[in-house]
Amino acid sequence: MQLQDKVVAITGASRGIGEAIARAAVAAGARVVLASRKQADLDRVAASLPADRVLAVACHTGKPDEVDAMVARAVAHFGRLDGLVNNAATNPYFGPLIDTPDAAIDKTFEVNVRGYLYGARALVRHARTRADGDRGGAIVNVASVAGIRAAPMQGIYGASKAAVISLTQTLAFELGGSNIRVNAIAPGLVETKFASAIVGNPMLRDHVISRTPLARHAQPAEIAGTAIYLLSDAASFTTGAVIVVDGGLTSS
């Protein structure tokens, strides 16, 4: 599970799961492109990592021109791009599915689904034109257990993550001939700012934990190891997989 000499782009890398994956990737030997909407937040993370191993690029993943520009900068800076972790996500609405505002539906799918497809498309285009004889690559999509089971009060978010799982499986089928592997991680409850509506609410948090065999929620670093595996050559025969990392929540 080493990433020596690999170049990996990670979206949503300014905090939470994305930041944890970025730190783990650097520790595993990779050169890493940190992507997120706000440059200042990226610069904070980059400042704590070896300067010659990271590139921080502000990028709104829901905008295809910005995604293409991020990949172009990665290739110009490091000479290639071997892997992509689609992690940037949004969840602007918490409430009954039937009451979801149209703007929240559009925003959720713009970032959580279209953004993942834009990232995959940019990596694939680069991988297919590389002249170094190694045109493969690895894409890791961060989904959620909300895309596998019912997601009360997070219905549109759950629907977007179900779409991510479908996207993962279809891309794995279509890109296998190009030696591009596509897999997904489905985390359970993780203590991040993104999940603060649940983690910070004792009633909601305890409800989730009571259904989780390990009787706790996760820390971001506990998701990172799975991402490193899927990016590495150790997963050379793994594609189209959805690896659940949820403390056993969906096992019951």
Image (cartoon, rainbow, N blue to C red):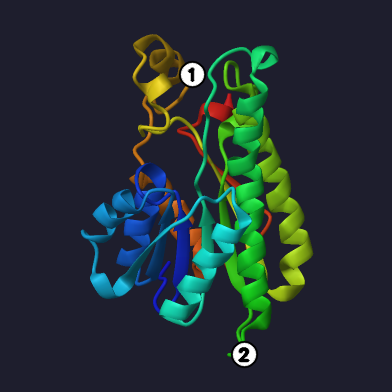
Residue 126, horizontal then vertical, whole percent: 62, 75
Q: Nearer the viewer, residue 206 or 35?
A: 35
What's the CA distance linking mark 1 and mark 2? 50 Å
Classify residue 50 as left or right of residue 123: left
Q: Nearer the viewer, residue 228 or 113?
A: 113
Residue 145, horizontal then vertical, whole percent: 57, 33
Q: Nearer the viewer, residue 157 or 181?
A: 157
Numbered circle sitting on residue 211? 1
* Residue drawn at 38 percent across, 48 percent down: 38
* Residue drawn at 68 percent across, 78 percent down: 128
Quadrant in the rendering for residue 58: bottom left
Residue 191 visible to the viewer: yes
Query: At label 2, which amino acid type do we have?
Result: Ala
Disc on the earlier residue, 1 or 2: 2
Residue 155 to residue 182: above or below:
above
Numbered circle sitting on residue 192? none
Helix, strand or loop under label 1: loop
The crowd level at tag 1 (other Cα within 10 Å; few <14, some 14-19, many 20+) is some
Helix, strand or loop under label 2: loop
Classify residue 165 as left or right of residue 46: right
Quadrant in the rendering for residue 65: bottom right
The crowd level at tag 2 (other Cα within 10 Å; few <14, some 14-19, many 20+) is few
Please state which of the two labelled residues, at mark 1 or mark 2, is closer to the viewer.
2
Residue 239 to residue 7: above or below:
above
Residue 107, horizontal then vertical, whole percent: 60, 34
* Residue drawn at 64 percent across, 19 percent down: 101
| Location of mark 2 (residue) | 131
Residue 237 visible to the viewer: no
